[in-house]
């Protein structure tokens, strides 16, 4: 299996780059944001709990996130691989993801770290709010809190994968970077050879 962690702050373009990787490599996209929103829409117990954190711009606790993700991976065991978008966000989640994947006899292949300047992130998120209907994208104080939480709690996860020599950095200056697939394709293609 080809399993990619797509990593970056809110608004870095993880969803956009996920679409490109899915199309090229026929992977299953697992976005914790999408999984949260589906559970919230269904008003599942985990969804209601996740919503209470998201509405404040806080990270959803690991135990909730991991249970939702485990359920999604188990539904798609026949996949060629997964793109994990927005997960893991903590070192504990990274270790838990390793454990979850181990139960399915697979592991993380690489982490692609998207890096974007903070002012550009704010601009993207405010713009996305006009089309997404997401309340957390339209409030600058929530956006700033999300970025701050990312920098304090999530950015250190890079070291988890750096220590495993699985991390690749990509400065995402433009939302639709044409260089993204060019940069990663040689590594990903070598996985299939």
Image (cartoon, grey):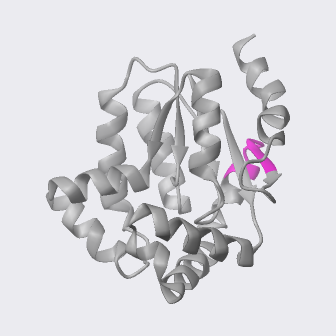
> Where 41 sits versus 183, above or below?
below
Residue beneath the point at 81% across and 41% down: 178
Residue sitting nearer the eye, 13 or 81: 13
Residue beneath the point at 36% across and 52% down: 66
Most distant residue in the bottom direction: 141
What segment carries the magenta color?
161-169
Residue beneath the point at 76% across and 19% down: 189
> Magenta stretch containing residue 167, yes or no?
yes
> Where 114 sits versus 4, above or below?
below
Residue sitting nearer the eye, 19 or 72: 19
Horizontal placement of 40 versus 3: left or right?
left
Q: State the quadrant of the N terminus.
A: top right
User: Where's residue 45, x and y in %?
Assistant: 15, 60
Residue beneath the point at 66% across and 67% down: 155
> Magenta stretch containing residue 106, yes or no?
no
> Where 155 sits versus 179, above or below?
below
User: Where's residue 36, x and y in %?
Assistant: 33, 56
Horizontal placement of 164 versus 69: left or right?
right
Most distant residue in the top direction: 193
User: Where's residue 174, x and y in %?
Assistant: 78, 56
Q: State the quadrant of the C terminus.
A: top right
Horizontal placement of 96 versus 35: left or right?
right
Figure label count: 0
User: Where's residue 102, x and y in %?
Assistant: 46, 32
Specify the quadrant of the image occupied by residue 165. top right
């Amino acid at each position: 299996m080809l399993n990619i962690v797509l990593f970056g702050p809110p608004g870095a373009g993880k969803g956009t780059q996920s679409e490109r990787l899915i199309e090229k490599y026929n992977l299953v996209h697992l976005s914790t944001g999408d999984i949260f929103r589906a559970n919230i829409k269904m008003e599942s117990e985990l969804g209601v709990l996740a919503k209470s954190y998201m509405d404040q711009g806080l990270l959803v606790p690991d135990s909730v996130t991991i249970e939702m993700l485990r359920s999604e991976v188990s539904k798609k065991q026949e996949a060629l691989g997964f793109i994990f978008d927005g997960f893991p966000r903590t070192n504990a989640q990274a270790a838990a993801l390793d454990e979850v994947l181990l139960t399915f006899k697979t592991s993380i292949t690489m982490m692609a770290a998207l890096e974007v300047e903070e002012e550009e992130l704010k601009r993207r998120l405010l713009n996305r709010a006009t089309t997404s209907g997401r309340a957390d994208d339209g409030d600058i104080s929530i956006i700033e809190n999300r970025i701050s939480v990312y920098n304090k709690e999530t950015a250190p996860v890079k070291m988890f994968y750096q220590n495993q020599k699985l991390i690749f950095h990509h400065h995402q200056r433009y939302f639709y970077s044409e260089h993204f697939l060019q940069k990663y394709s040689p590594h990903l293609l070598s996985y299939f050879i």
